[in-house]
Amino acid sequence: MPDNPVEAYTCANINLTGIGVYDSQNGNEFDFRGITSGNNSLLVTLDAGNNTILLTFNIQQIIDDLPDATTTQRGVLETATDAEAIGKALNNKILTPSNLAAIGATSTFAGLIEIATNAEALTGASTSLAITPANLAYVNAAQLTTRVFADAVARAAAVPAFAGQFGQQNDTGQSYCAYGTNAGEWSLLVSESGDNSGTFAFNTALVAFTGASTLQIGDTINPASLDVSAASYLNITATASLNLDGGSKLLISATSIPADSVVITGGVAGNPSSKLINTFISTSNTQTGYTAFANGATLRTCDTATVTLAQLAQIVGTLITDLKAVKLPAT
């Protein structure tokens, strides 16, 4: 302060808010207030070289002074480890997004789970997605929906919503069931009565017709065929019958059995083939080496009471000649 007694000097706090550092004047002395901290959360130090008072927050002390957060009080908490999150026992730790990834729900652990889309619910394959009532409503509506095809072309292009969905073809009135979820994966269904024309593929080990059942393959107006493919068999059990009506054919390897033929096994038990009767007899089941009878005479009748040995020889010779005529014995 200048030592001029004529001049009068004063001090004043000009701040609009807060507390000023000027306190009062005592004669020629101006008194200023000191700066300190009410606790260790704020550190007050002097930077003498810069004539500056430094106010520094003691962050750790502030954290230590804050209370723990509870359901009724704001405060601070430590983040949980994944193990602590999975344990679900502590009430003084908080979860982070990385913890959430570790607590996914399983069949044995209650945790977070993603909600399935309608398409995922309909597919029914995921074991890590949750189903909502809305998903169930969508699935129920979809499963109750029957696909309708105008014709075979439309059916071949139709994609089933799920395996087991039913379909109806309008131009034939036939019913189908989906066996997959790709375009055209529809199997023709056999109805209890009525027209079941079409191509059927039985992929089961056994198709059984019991009791008084009848399997009719076509009719005189709508010819059809029963195709028993390679490595398969048609088993007609005891008391059953295979009835081939007039005009029906029995084929082996897609070839009609010739007239006047027999069905035989072709070298392997159970594998059928066919041969003409005369070919079968003359090549497969013949006895050769019969000698021509000298002084033979055709004789086909006799009196058993008076027949002679010569007459018996003539009868045997006539019989062998007759058999050779139909090629029963080759020679």
Image: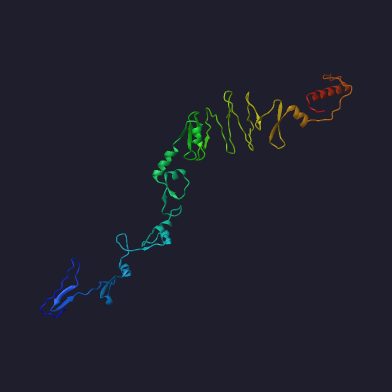
Question: Toward which corner of the image does residue 68 lie, by quadrant?
Answer: bottom left
Total labels: the figure holds 0
Question: 226 left or right of 194?
Answer: right
Q: Residue at x 49, y 36 (%)?
A: 157
Q: Residue at x 43, y 39 (%)?
A: 142
Between residue 123 and residue 69, name the one nearer to us: 123
Image coordinates of residue 251 in percent, x first then y, are 65, 30
Quadrant occupied by the N terminus: bottom left
Question: Toward which corner of the image does residue 309 lie, by quadrant?
Answer: top right
Image coordinates of residue 330 in percent, x first then y, are 80, 28
Residue farthest along the bottom direction in this orientation: 3
Image coordinates of residue 322 in percent, x first then y, are 80, 23
Residue farthest along the left direction in this orientation: 6
Q: Residue at x 43, y 61 (%)?
A: 83
Query: What is the basis of the colouring in this image?
Result: rainbow
Quadrant occupied by the C terminus: top right
Image coordinates of residue 56 in percent, x first then y, are 29, 71
Between residue 101 and residue 130, name the one nearer to us: 101
Between residue 274 and residue 322, name the one nearer to us: 274
Question: 194 left or right of 71?
Answer: right
Does residue 193 sit above or below 21 in this rendering? above
Question: Toward which corner of the image does residue 71 lie, by quadrant?
Answer: bottom left
Does residue 16 sit above or below 205 in this rendering? below
